[in-house]
Image (cartoon, rainbow, N blue to C red):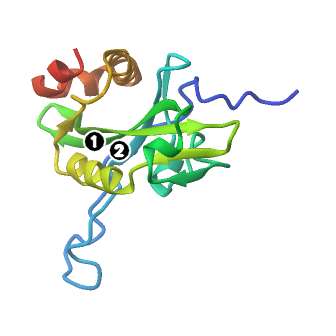
């Protein structure tokens, strides 16, 4: 009997803060951006679900596989909407919390094996999430609710420790 590897289960975990790899020395790599505290959440409003998919960090999420990525939205008129949400986790005096959250659109036309994705938008949102920014105002209300429910259910303590700005943006 095969094991169900469906992403709807909580078998995927957020990347929680690790030690600073450059701590204590000024050698090679100092000043480089660390993605150790970032995770990617796929919000699928078509199937009413959200899940962690670390493959998105390298353009290899479930929704991006086996499709040709195009930079022109008009080239994918029948694409289904998904959001890749870049979630950065930090620690404060109360514990871990969702510090930066930025959603980036992707539209996937699976039958025609093509997808729209703006790489500059994804890179910008990833960077802004790392800096603790909340960028979800362009997301539809249903997708924001899915994301909110996922983040809260995934780790209620991290949700409770998060800023009022995040909670308001996703309410």
Classify the position of the N terminus by image quarter.
top right
Badge 2 element? loop
Secondary element at tag 1 = strand
Residue 83 horizontal side relative to residue 76, left or right: left
Q: Residue at x 21, y 28 (%)?
A: 137
Q: CA distance from mark 2 to mark 1?
A: 6 Å
Please give the name of the residue rendered at 21% of the width and 36% of the height, measured from the top-left corner.
Answer: 135
For disc 1, the marked residue is: 89
**N-terminal-most mark, 2 or 1:** 2
- Give 26 or 77, whichever is nearer the viewer: 77
Task: Tell me whether the residue at label 2 lies in contact with that at label 1, contact meaning CB atoms closer than 8 angstroms.
Answer: yes
Q: Quadrant of residue 149?
A: top left
Where is the C terminus found, in terms of image quarters? top left
Residue 14 in sight from this viewpoint = no
In this image, 140 relative to 137: left or right? Answer: right
Dot label at residue 16: 2
Viewer-side residue, 140 vs 31: 140
- 34 with respect to 9 (left or right): left
Whether residue 100 is visible to the viewer of this picture, yes or no, is yes
- Return the x and y of residue 19 as percentages of the image width and height: 29, 59
How far across and how far down the image is residue 152, in percent? 33, 19
Against 137, residue 64 (above or below) is below
In this view, the residue farthest toward the right is 1
Dot 2 crowding, Cα within 10 Å, few <14, some 14–19, many 20+: some
Disc 2 versus disc 1: nearer the observer: 1
Q: Residue at x 25, y 54 (%)?
A: 127
Packing grade of label 1 (10 A; few <14, some 14-19, many >=20) is: many
Task: Please state which of residues 136 and 50 is positioned toward the viewer in this rendering.
Answer: 136
């Amino acid at each position: 009997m095969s094991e169900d590897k469906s992403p709807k289960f909580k078998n995927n975990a957020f990347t929680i803060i690790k030690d600073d790899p450059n701590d204590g020395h000024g050698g090679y790599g100092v000043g480089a951006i660390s993605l150790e505290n970032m995770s990617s959440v796929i919000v699928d409003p078509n199937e009413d679900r959200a899940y962690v998919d670390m493959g998105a960090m390298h353009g290899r999420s479930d929704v991006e596989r086996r499709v040709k990525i195009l930079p022109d939205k008009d080239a994918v008129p029948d694409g289904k909407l998904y959001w890749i949400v870049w979630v950065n986790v930090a620690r404060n005096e109360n514990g871990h919390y969702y510090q930066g959250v930025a959603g980036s659109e992707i539209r996937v036309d699976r039958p025609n094996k093509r997808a729209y994705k703006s790489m500059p938008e994804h890179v910008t949102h990833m960077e802004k999430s790392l800096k603790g920014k909340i960028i979800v105002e362009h997301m539809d209300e249903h997708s924001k609710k899915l994301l909110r429910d996922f983040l809260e259910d995934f780790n209620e303590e991290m949700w409770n420790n998060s800023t009022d700005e995040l909670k308001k943006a996703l309410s």
